[in-house]
Amino acid sequence: MWVPNLPVTVLTGLAAGAGVLCIFKDVYGGPAFDKKVLANGKTVIVTGATSGIGSKAAFDFAKRGAKVFMACRDMKKCEEVRREIVLDTGNKYVYCRPCDLASTASIRAFVERFKKEEPYVDVLVNNAGVMEAPTRVTLDGFETHLGVNHMGHFLLTNLLLDTLKKSAPSRVILVTCSAHSKGQIHKEDLNMSAKYDPAAAYNQSKLANVLFARELGRRMLNTGVSVIAVDPGFTDTELTRNMAMMKSITRFLLYPLFWPVMKRAMTGAQVILHAALDPALEGAAGDYYVDMKKTNPSELAQNYELAMWMWKVSHKWTKLDEHLAALAAT
């Protein structure tokens, strides 16, 4: 009686299974944004563009013909990614610029340089972020999640608002996630210095992102500056590197289980491209999109009084008036 070659059979089955998983992963991730929509003539800024969905969004913008400024903290890594994008897309108008969201001085220096180099900005993508980092503060004394994920982008956006208005129709994209629905704004201890919890700090910063988008959208009505908050969904990126389970052996047990339902970074980046380039989103005023579909954020994220409170506190903490005055003097 003929007995099949078991090792070959097993390997063939595993290969077929892997193929099915890859197909499922791509289908689960959702469709890509319309490749026919180009970005020729547009100037785009992407923060956190050295990895994850930020780097893939920068790549896709460049491929569609945009002039792309990668605003990043790590210049060595940024240059490596920039070279890859230029070589792969043939678009030489891709630039690295230092911008550390954990430093208001770095943010102001980035804006000063950008305004000297470019008269317009069509799309600002506030993408950079940290997740469940250990307890520490930024150079300006902000809790890390609050400082990088929210305060840094709040300052960057406001310092560029005059250019965004001059460039209208233009867009501001804020990358958030479903964690905002678990978030609370700790008014009595926004820096969470009394009782720090990394997950709660991250959730608070993501809620702050949505509140910022909604209040900025309200303030930008009739200016030609559209504001959109996007949720890329469960995406496989380096953002989770600080999580405790990702630093232990548990990672090797859990990652294979979650891998099939985790989006590729390029797939996750499509929500940014959609928000930045889809003509139908012109005039958006802080709308929230998940997988390129408009939906409602959490009830707390729709609280306009909370959004206004967060705006005023952010304005004060970032010393926005001082930074604007300094920019005007240059």
Image (cartoon, rainbow, N blue to C red):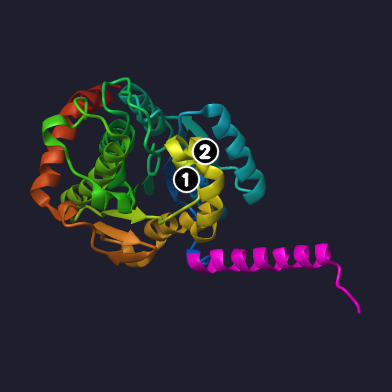
Question: What's the magenta bit mostly, secondary-structure-wise?
Answer: helix
Measuring 11% from the left and 45% from the top, which residue is drawn there? Answer: 306
The range drawn in magenta is 1-28
Measuring 50% from the left and 35% from the top, which residue is drawn there? Answer: 247
Where 68 sits versus 33, above or below? above
Where 1 sits versus 284, above or below? below
Kindly give the residue lying farthest to the left in the view shown.
305
Secondary structure found at label 2: loop
Foreground: 1 or 152?
A: 1
Q: Is residue 19 magenta?
A: yes
Distance from the alpha carbon under mark 2 to that under mark 1: 7 Å
Residue 275 in percent (x, y) is at 37, 58
Q: Amino acid at mark 2?
A: Thr
Residue located beneath label 2 in the image: 50
Measuring 11% from the left and 32% from the top, which residue is drawn there? Answer: 188
Measuring 46% from the left and 33% from the top, which residue is drawn there? Answer: 72
Where 80 sits versus 7, above or below? above
Where 31 sits versus 217, above or below? below
Kindly give the residue lying farthest to the front in the view shown.
1
Mark 2 nearby-residue class (10 Å; few <14, some 14–19, many ≥20): many
> Left of 79 or right of it: where is 179?
left
| Quarter of the N terminus within the rendering | bottom right
Residue 291 in percent (x, y) is at 39, 63
> Left of 312 or right of it: where is 145?
right
Residue located beneath label 1 in the image: 54
Q: Amino acid at mark 1?
A: Gly
Mark 1 nearby-residue class (10 Å; few <14, some 14–19, many ≥20): many
